[in-house]
Image: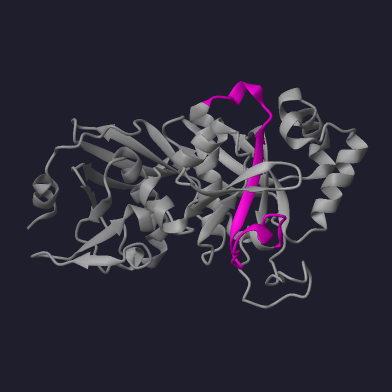
Amino acid sequence: MTLRARIDAVSGTAPLDGWTGTSRHWPVAGEDLTVESLPRGAHTARLRAARGGDPIAEAELRSGADEAVLALTGSAGRHPADAPLVAALIEAAFQRCPDARRLRVAGLGGAPALLGLAAEVEAASEAPDAIVERALFYQLPLLWLNARTRAAYPLIRSQVGPQDRLPPLRPPQPNGPFYRRWLPHLGTTLSFRAIDRRHDLALFHGWMNQKRVAYYWELAQSEAELDRYLADQEADPHLFGVIGSFDDVPVGYFEFYWAKEDRLGPYYDAEDFDRGWHGLIGNVEHLGRPKTLAWFRAITHYLFLDEPRTRRIMGEPRATHRKMLSYCADAAYETLKEFDFPHKRAALVCCERERFFCKVPL
């Protein structure tokens, strides 16, 4: 069966109803790639990848009810160095086909660039096809993380932390930008960078002193007091602060923490690599459910990518905060129970890795 026949064999019952136009991708190799979509009909499109404006690869895409087919032209994918390029084309294909559970890369089963992307190969009459599962692809740290900020440690038990919940030795906090992903439904790039109190203190102070933020965070303090707060955080191995941006415009502040040694740890059976987070949207121009939900999903995605041994992302929102709990539900967080902190009645929420990547669109 030819590549064209395999493209045509897919049932065209699901139109290309995702992103149209040009998407952006940042492979860990440090490249800046764009993928342009050139629609050819309701179910077919041409994907054209470029680096610095120069075309470097093309592929034919056809949607299906549960599976889409991608056929790369030329020699792309047949060298190990092509893996970042192929990953960008695969991400673009999943963006164009949001209902596709898997992607069939025609004729490239066993090709060097697909060996780290496809966990399954299906034989065909001419050449095997590589099968890329959406739920597995988005767990691979190929396109969204800054490789210089990733430092997975071996399991070395530390003596620093709560004596009844001693954690493993934690990697150092990241510096600078560490996650970036283009959001097709919003037409913007979402990114995270570590907060730097030398440059971000005024922004942090302004956000914390907003009345709606202060109600939950209780940090409506002076710049000097908030500088001490951030300095204490820098010396704490169990958490770090983050600025989240849309198209490099600061939008929100988040804290990512290891749940075992956090205040949450004693209230459930914590595992070494459980993570959690708190957050606020400080830039009022970016409030609203679509963008807030994008933060929930991106944060959870990053925390799972950052440490492959993390099986659960935990949370402890106020039990009465119904809007927050509705966001949790839409990001695959399940409410396990309610419990009492000294300062609030909380809901214990949990997002499991498998459920997140199977249920949440990215």
Judging from the image, the colouring scheme is: one colour
Q: Residue at x 40, y 43 (%)?
A: 50
Q: How many marks?
A: 0
Q: Is residue 35 found left or right of 305 in the rendered image?
A: left
Where residue 123 appears, as percent x and y from the top left, is 14, 67
**Left or right: residue 190 compared with residue 10:** right
- State whether residue 128 is above or below residue 324: below
The residue under the point 85% across, 45% down is 229
Q: Residue at x 42, y 34 (%)?
A: 184
Q: Position of residue 153 (x, y in %)?
A: 63, 72
Residue 150 inside the magenta-drawn segment: no
Snapshot quadrant of residue 201: top right
Residue at the extreme right of the image, as rendered: 224
Q: Position of residue 25 (x, y in %)?
A: 46, 45
Tell me where the magenta segment starts and ends, as one range.
Answer: 261-288
Please state, as top left, top right, bottom left or bottom right, where the N terminus lies in the image.
Answer: bottom left
In the displayed orientation, state which residue is furthest to the top.
285
- Is residue 356 visible in the rendered image? The answer is yes
